Image (cartoon, rainbow, N blue to C red):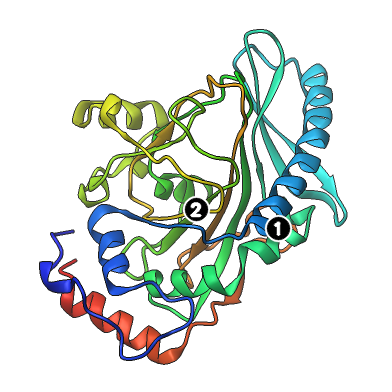
């Protein structure tokens, strides 16, 4: 991916499209690998997600503790277990870690909306999907990810530096970049404030332009290759306010460290893939279903033309 045309600034669409990213924001996504939309979620929406996330968390701890005892999980070992929600087994999946003090920490709940249906509605709001349609360049997309990521005070939960495309191909070896631009957009909404000390999301701008081919490597080798090319201590921390939302390219390198503060840091994450890019149903009731992105056809045409002709990809 080459550098974008610098003449994009201050250009506007032909009309005021509802929920649209500006051309400058679109260019930022493809040039930097991400774009932040401030206050995309209202305070009421943040509060709703926070309330549902806490309900899910308490039950997840109970389930994970029982699973750990029954399966003898080693210290610092990660494990998954099913969250039996209102639609039966495997409505959601819990990823937990057994820490040094033998206490279970919840890293994330995958397809959280399989248990708490309101989370699906919040993740599929038009103010999200229109922007996703612009970035993917399509009218429909598969909703693959509806997750809560948890960083509780001093729980030592971390995420190593990685690209999201690796996770897609880990699950679906036949994953295909149909649109030639990654065919996936990750949408991360801050539910708590992200600070210097509570394990905020860290990104390496422009790293999505490097052909690292990490998805072809085992995770250990992948991390070594990243460290050979980048000083991960120089990754940029995204200090987000509740409601701020990051739209992230699937090849952008990102990570997050431990929460060393006395406050929680939770993220609400949704991911959408271009039609036919994904070939395997994700765990959870209703996951990977194709949804209408509700994007104005004229907006889609204008955006696609802008990306094709004004951005050199």
Q: Is residue 308 above or below residue 40?
A: below
Q: In the image, is 305 to the left or to the right of 80?
A: left
Q: Which residue is mark 1?
A: 119
Return the disc, 2 or 1, that comes first in the chain's sequence: 1
Query: Where does residue 205 sit, x and y in percent of width and height?
Result: 26, 45
Q: Is any atom of residue 284 visible in this view?
A: no
Name the residue nearer the viewer: 221 or 246: 246
Residue at x 32% of width, y 80% of height = 303
- Residue drawn at point x = 60 percent, y = 75 percent: 291
> Residue 97 sits in which quadrant?
top right
Toward the top, the furthest residue is: 101
What is the crowding at mark 2: few (fewer than 14 residues within 10 Å), some, or many (at least 20)?
many
Pinpoint residue 163: horizontal percent, then vertical percent. Answer: 38, 44
Q: Secondary structure at mark 2?
A: loop
Where's the N terminus, which quadrant? Answer: bottom left
Question: In the rendered view of the protein, which quadrant contains the C terminus?
Answer: bottom left
Could you tell me which residue is drawn at 80 percent across and 26 percent down? 67
Q: Which residue is mark 2?
A: 244
Q: Is residue 15 visible?
A: yes
| In this view, 3 is above or below 85 | below
**Residue 6 image offset from top left, x and y in percent:** 11, 67
Alpha carbons under labels 2 and 1: distance apart = 17 Å
Q: Which residue occupies the extreme front position in the image?
A: 43
Is 215 placed above or below 260 here? below
């Amino acid at each position: 991916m080459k550098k974008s045309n610098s003449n994009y600034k201050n250009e506007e669409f032909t009309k005021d499209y509802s929920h649209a990213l500006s051309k400058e924001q679109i260019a930022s996504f493809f040039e930097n690998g991400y774009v932040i939309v401030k206050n995309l979620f209202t305070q009421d929406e943040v509060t709703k997600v926070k309330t549902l996330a806490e309900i899910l968390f308490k039950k997840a701890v109970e389930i994970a503790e029982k699973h750990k005892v029954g399966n003898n999980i080693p210290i610092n070992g990660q494990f998954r277990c099913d969250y039996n929600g209102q639609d039966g087994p495997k409505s959601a999946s819990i990823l937990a870690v057994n820490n040094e003090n033998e206490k279970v920490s919840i890293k994330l709940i995958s397809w959280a909306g399989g248990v708490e249906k309101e989370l699906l509605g919040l993740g599929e709001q038009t103010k999200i999907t229109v922007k996703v349609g612009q970035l993917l360049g399509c009218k429909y997309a598969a909703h693959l990810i509806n997750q809560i990521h948890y960083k509780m005070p001093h729980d030592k939960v971390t995420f190593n530096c990685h690209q999201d495309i690796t996770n897609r191909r880990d699950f679906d070896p036949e994953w295909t970049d149909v649109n030639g631009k990654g065919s996936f957009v990750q949408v991360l909404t801050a539910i708590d404030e992200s600070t210097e000390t509570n394990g905020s999301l860290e990104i390496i701008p422009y790293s999505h332009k490097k052909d690292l081919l990490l998805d072809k490597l085992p995770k250990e080798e992948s991390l070594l290759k990243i460290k050979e090319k980048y000083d991960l201590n120089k990754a940029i921390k995204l200090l987000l306010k509740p409601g701020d939302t990051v739209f992230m390219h699937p090849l952008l390198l990102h990570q997050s460290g431990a929460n060393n503060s006395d406050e929680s840091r939770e993220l609400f994450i949704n991911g959408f893939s271009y039609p036919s890019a994904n070939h395997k149903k994700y765990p959870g009731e209703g996951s990977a279903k194709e949804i209408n992105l509700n994007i104005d056809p004229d907006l889609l045409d204008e955006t696609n033309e802008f990306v094709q002709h004004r951005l050199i990809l």
